[in-house]
Image (tube, rainbow, N blue to C red):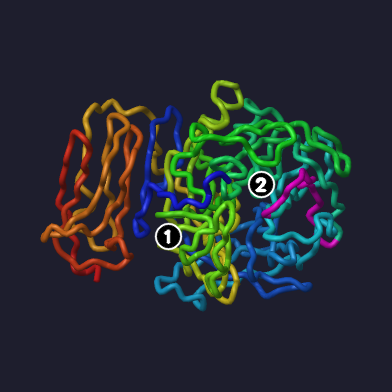
Amino acid sequence: MKGFAMKQKCVQRASTILILCFQTSFAQRINPENFEYRGAFKLPAGSNGSNWEYSGYGMTFYPGGDAGGPNDGYPGSIFAIGHDHHQMVSEINIPVPVISPGKSIDELNTAQTLQAFQDITHGMFGELEIPRADLAYLPAQGTQTTDKLYFCWGQHFQFEFFPSHGACDLNLSNPQTSGPWFFGNFTNYVTNDYLFEIPAAWADPHVPGARLASGRFRDGGWGGHGPTLFAFDPWNDGQPPAENGTLASITPLLLYGIQEPGVIEISTSDAMKMNGYSEADEWSGGAWLTAGENSAVAFVGTKGLGNFWYGFSNGVVWPFEGPYPPVPEFPYDDRGWWSDSIQAQIIFFDPADFAAVARGEKQTFNPQPYAHLNLDPVLFAPGFDLWDYKRYSLGACCFDRENSLLYIFERQVVDGASLIHTWFINSNISGVQTKSKNHSTILRQNHPNPFSHLTKIEYQLPQPAQIELSLWDVRGRKVLQFFTGMQSTGLHQIMWTGKDSNGISVTSGIYFLQLRGSDFNLTKKIVLLPEYN
């Protein structure tokens, strides 16, 4: 919390582009270029006293769900958490997603309820202020005789250590719930938000028996300077572990800081920080992605861009100590971490880095994201909605491993209701595999060129460098600054959609792409065709 009254600068500012940053790797990674957007679908009407408004902070894919459904390429079902105030769970089928060019809700298919909303925890966590929660399905493990839904629950402020995890059967009306359990000796600020399966092919050699991953990102740095991740296997701590018992079989894989014994906040420093970290970020979901031989650990959420501060959305800063300013009037009265703008993103981590952490070869704060994907272009309601107290774009995510389908909640789209978006992870597109042998800075010609709606820009750095990548028109006016700041060695990609820094489509014509550093200044000509407008 030190110095949170000060406005700070965030490295990234481009809110209308898609920046893909690649570092080196010795194993095949899933990259943003592997993602094929399939569309979105609506959620059904409410049931049993709850609904899908202000929903979507927890979800998991169930491969055995909707067994009698159509053979439409979207098998299985989704268990998900509904309205934030109710914290109940329902099971829905998965209709064929629809791409609506005009972002019309009416064009989307609607999921059907398979199991009505139920309170699977029987109120074990009580009322929660700004809840954080997730679900994860796993088939029976160890000596278990039934498949399980694992869950975690917490809230924004937790000034003591609380039990946070548990499990239940898949019959929501008779869940046979066990828990809650303390998550080792770790603070709730790093453990109880996202929850997902670890594939056995990775878990068996690196964290034997641990098939679940849990973690959390806590804004303001209370949970460290980035998202967290822990591998664990509660079935080895009892069948089930005792109520209010402490899970012991836990392996930290990602933690940008140090857990001091008995301390609620994580101890951290600038040397233990995720690249691009901002106190105004919100990483609300995670999945361990696999597609063929490729893999990645993905976190989904909302990236704060530009300046960020603690206070109110109109720029009023709330100081660490008084005197305090007047609270602004609605809709600017929601206090918290704010930024100039936000962008829905997926950030990608290399599982090989987590393997090195598990072996003790790296510290938990060493892994860094190697790429990120901007999801704003496909969202129906990107950005802030102050009148609806909407600060974050995305909720949870879940992954159908057999069919390489990723599902992500978009929150508060229309009248508070959520949507679910779908991507196919294409394993036929190669990831980054080996280190580059090129020893010069390269700015490649964009492709396609000329283009009408989307073009790819690539550049390569032989070593880390302070760079600026920008776009200029024929009159010498800067149209868009793609990136400014320090970037790592390797290949970097940007997808440009023909919009300026304000998100407005530019006119057709000739533009100049400039990549500038301390010892290089490279330029390429870009031609935007009139069909774009």
Q: Residue 258: x percent and y percent? A: 62, 32
The three-letter amino acid code for the residue at tag 1 is Asp
Decide: few, some or many residues near mark 1? Use Cα within 10 Å; few <14, some 14-19, many ≥20.
Answer: some
The three-letter amino acid code for the residue at tag 2 is Leu
Q: Residue at x 76, y 45 (%)?
A: 160
Decide: few, some or many residues near mark 2? Use Cα within 10 Å; few <14, some 14-19, many ≥20.
Answer: many
Q: Give whichever of 439, 129 is nearer the camera.
A: 129
In terms of image quadrants, where is residue 199?
top right
Labels in figure, total: 2
268 inside magenta stretch: no
Q: Which residue is mark 2?
A: 195
Q: Residue 223: x percent and y percent? A: 62, 43
Q: Give whichever of 29, 395 is nearer the camera.
A: 395
Q: Which residues are magenta?
A: 156-173
Check the image and name the residue furthest to the bottom: 106
Nearer to us of marks 1 and 2 is 1
Q: Which residue is mark 1?
A: 340
Q: Residue at x 31, y 46 (%)?
A: 484
Horizontal side of residue 377 vs 57, given as left or right: left
163 inside magenta stretch: yes
Looking at the rendered structure, the secondary structure element under dot 1 is strand
